Amino acid sequence: VQLVESGGGLVQAGGSLRLSCAASGITFRLDAMGWYRQAPGKQRELVAAITSGGRTNYGDSVKGRFAISGDNAKNTVYLQMNSLKPEDTAVYYCNAKTLDMGYREYWGQGTQVTVSS
């Protein structure tokens, strides 16, 4: 299983970025995909997640600014990030979870998002 992220980069405060994550090598049901982030010296935190049924969950700091969406047929998840702030600067990691024949989760390698003030 491989999660490949794209779309990170450098943007000015107030700008937007769109992250994509495609899962390959999937031979089972994916129950949820999402994004986490980790800033230097801080713990990894949930940004947003979406279930295969379309239910979404957001971290408090990004509610109203970020939107997650997914394409079950393509095992792909997207994160639209608007009104970016310098405190959004972090490495963003894609995550996928399955309960098919037991709980398993997978992580991407991460993509850097840097927001300049």
Image: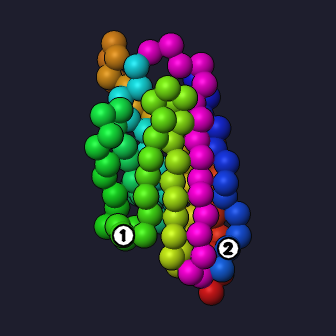
The residues tagged by marks 1 and 2 sit, at their Cα atoms, a distance apart of: 19 Å
> At x 44% / y 52%, what residue is drawn?
68
Q: How is the image coloured?
A: rainbow
- Name the kind of residue labelled 2 in the image: Val
| Residue that lies at the very extreme toward the right in this rendered image | 10
Query: Where residue 50 appears, x then y in whole percent?
Result: 37, 43
What span is colored magenta in the figure? 13-28
SS for callout 1:
loop
| Picture coordinates of residue 45, whole percent (x, y) | 41, 57
**Residue lying at 55% horizontally and 29% vertically, measured from the top left:** 74
| Magenta-drawn stretch contains 14 | yes
Quadrant of residue 21 within the rendered picture: top right
Residue shown at 45% from the left, 30% from the top: 72
Q: Quadrant of the N terminus?
A: top right
- Name the foreground residue: 65 vs 25: 65
Determine if residue 81 is in view.
yes
User: Considering depth in this image, is 72 or 86 the residue closer to the camera?
Assistant: 72
Dot 2, crowdedness within 10 Å: few (<14), some or many (≥20)? Answer: some
- Quarter of the rendering occupied by the C terminus: bottom right
Q: Which quadrant of the view contains residue 62? A: bottom left
Q: Which residue is mark 1?
A: 64
Q: Residue furthest bottom?
A: 117
